[in-house]
Image (cartoon, helix red, strand yellow):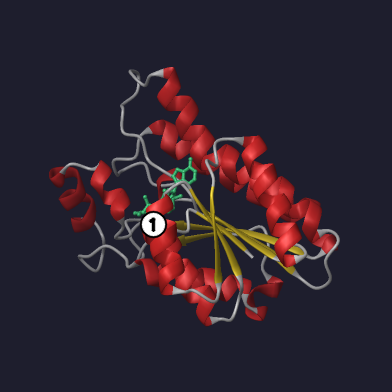
Amino acid sequence: MVITGAAGGMGRAITARLVKDNFQIMALDINESGLEKLTDDFPSSIFPYKVDLTDAAAISDAFMTVNTKFGGVDALVNNAGNCYMSEFPNIPSDEFNLQMAVNFSSAFYCSQEAVKSMLKRPGIKKIVNISSNGAYNFDVFDPPHYRASKAAMDTLTKDLARRYANQSICVNSIAPAMTESPLFDVLSKDVLDKAISQMPRGRAMKPDEIAAWVGFLISPAGDVSSGNVIILNQGRDVR
Ligand SMILES: NC(=O)c1ccc[n+]([C@@H]2O[C@H](COP(=O)([O-])OP(=O)(O)OC[C@H]3O[C@@H](n4cnc5c(N)ncnc54)[C@H](O)[C@@H]3O)[C@@H](O)[C@H]2O)c1
């Protein structure tokens, strides 16, 4: 299986959960020292691969390595992402392009490569996209290019779910709200405190709480779910 952004806050938790579930994992990330630490923690289950996921050719090379090393891909977690904080209408075009490349194009190209392999594999295959509640909640801080990148991801989820339903590839999104991770560093203290105070339990979610849902979707229990965007936010936006 392949996990992108495996060296980050959520990625580490997802990796730990899936190692516990006995998967062999190709961990993709641009953060070399983070990948080294991950490999030290899970030496027998992790194959680290440094890659810039904004580069489609580099993604293709990474999946060639996966196919050679593991014989193919049965599960992909598109988790790599970032949140750039310039505000509309003053978002520079290079920031807009990077936001879409890191959050959406990376998932698009990884999914293309994974599906080519999955179509040759037996059993039920899984793609889990880590989207964001920011694509659906317009009361909190998220800038529009971040929201749009995740909305694009969720449309890809539905397209691929429909396209490959009869070939046993399940595709779902998980869209979390505030979850403790190094990504919080992009926020000022005021913005962070306000966003956390809006969470019904008065605290952000923990990465392993999100990882548990990824593990569930990838387990046999998830075999009957495809095309869903699962929002995790402690019930914050129920009206
Ligand atoms: N933390 C939250 O509150 C929250 C909420 C909703 C959605 N998310 C989403 O969860 C996912 C994981 O975020 P996180 O909170 O763990 O943040 P994080 O910053 O801890 O992890 C992101 C990981 O992606 C990697 N990455 C970034 N750009 C890359 C690139 N070009 N090539 C390869 N790797 C790259 C980083 O090195 C990092 O390891 C993201 O997609 C994010 O949008 C996070």
* 138 or 97, nearer to the observer: 97
For residue 114, side relative to residue 187 (left or right): right
Seen at 31% across and 27% down, the residue is 86
Q: How many marks?
A: 1
Q: Quadrant of the N terminus?
A: bottom right
Mark 1 — residue? 34
Near mark 1 (Cα within 10 A), the count class, few <14, some 14-19 or many ≥20, is: some
For residue 155, side relative to residue 121 (left or right): left
Q: Position of residue 180 (x, y in %)?
A: 29, 60
Seen at 69% across and 54% down, the residue is 65
Q: Position of residue 18 (x, y in %)?
A: 54, 74
Q: Quadrant of the C terminus?
A: bottom left
For residue 117, side relative to residue 39 (left or right): right
Would you say residue 159 is visible in this rendering? no
Which SS class for mark 1?
helix
For residue 19, above or below residue 27 = below
Residue type (three-letter) at the residue carrying disc 1: Gly
Q: Position of residue 147 (x, y in %)?
A: 44, 39
For residue 193, above or below residue 84 = below
Mark 1 vs ligand 1: CB below 8 Å: yes
For residue 171, side relative to residue 25 (left or right): right
Q: Position of residue 93 (x, y in %)?
A: 44, 18
* 207 or 226, nearer to the observer: 207
Would you say residue 36 is visible in this rendering? yes
Seen at 42% across and 70% down, the residue is 40
For residue 236, above or below residue 189 = below
